[in-house]
Image: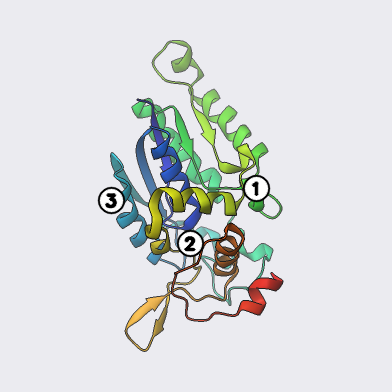
Amino acid sequence: MDKAICILSGGLDSTCIAAYLKEKGYELYAVTFYYGQKSRMEVERAKSIAGYIGVREHHIVDIGFMKSLYKDSNILTGDGNIPDRFDYSIVVPARNAIFLTIAGAWAFSINAALVAYGAHKDDEKNYPDCRAEFAKSMEHTLNLAEVDGIEQGLRRRLRIWSPAVEGLSKKDLVRIGYRVLGNVLFETWSCYTDGIEVKGRIKVQCGSCESCINRMRAFREAGIEDKTPYAILDLNKILKA
């Protein structure tokens, strides 16, 4: 059985690809990153999702020091209001390059065949590090970093995979994830915030940031009722997004 490492954020996309790889028969390993982002809830959700899926190992890697390096370069680790539609302030500099490098080092160490992350076709328009071209470039670079070990048979050649590489959209992922995981999919955390308290009792996803709106639209386009609780549900905003 081939080993695969999944970068598992606790969000919708990465959870769906973990389910997809599990269904494909990979022995699954997961890595989650805290990089100083506003939302710690996604890290907590990643823990429970990894347990439900039954990954062989799950590591939470704290690189929170990146927050001090990023400064105000982006809204996810910096200050300011999170937009309800795409703005380049959402792009965290070289985030996926950092994640894939760390996951790749782990993959070479355990002779995994593949590292997967949740970039899909819809991401390619706005996020440079989600494009298939980027994934292929990272694959080439990481394999160059271990080329001697690969040629000597000490390391396994690594594949970097994402849904974007196969032309899969967010709605495609939702359909796959729901087929495999059912209602567990509604436990994922997409919100860029750390949650909004409702009636002082429970934190729910805001329902108004760009990521929440993309999440709701994906369920709608996939034809699946979204049972996720949100603090704000503005259907007009979703339909116009």
Kind of residue at disc 1: Lys
Q: Amino acid at mark 2?
A: Lys
Where residue 69 appears, as percent x and y from the top left, is 52, 58
Decide which of tag 3 and tag 2 comes sooner along the chain: 3
- The quadrant in which residue 144 appears is top right
Q: Which residue is mark 1?
A: 121
Quadrant, the C terminus: bottom right
Is 3 positioned to the left or the right of 237 in the image?
left
Q: Residue at x 66, y 69 (%)?
A: 85
Q: Residues within 10 Å of mark 2 (few under 14, many from 20)?
A: some
- Quadrant of image for the N terminus: top left
Mark 3 nearby-residue class (10 Å; few <14, some 14–19, many ≥20): few
Mark number displayed over residue 51: 3
For the residues labelled 3 and 1, the Cα–Cα distance comes to: 28 Å
The mark that comes first in sequence, 2 or 1, is 2
The numbered mark at residue 67 is 2
Which sits earlier in the primary sequence, circle 3 or circle 1?
A: 3
Which residue is at a point 63% across and 33% down the rendered structure image?
137
4 relative to 174, above or below = above
**Circle 3: residue type:** Gly
Residue 42 found in image quarter: bottom left
Residue 208: x and y in percent read: 57, 76
Residue 6 against residue 72 in the figure, above or below: above
Judge from the rendering whether residue 13 lies leftward or rightward of residue 8; answer left or right. right
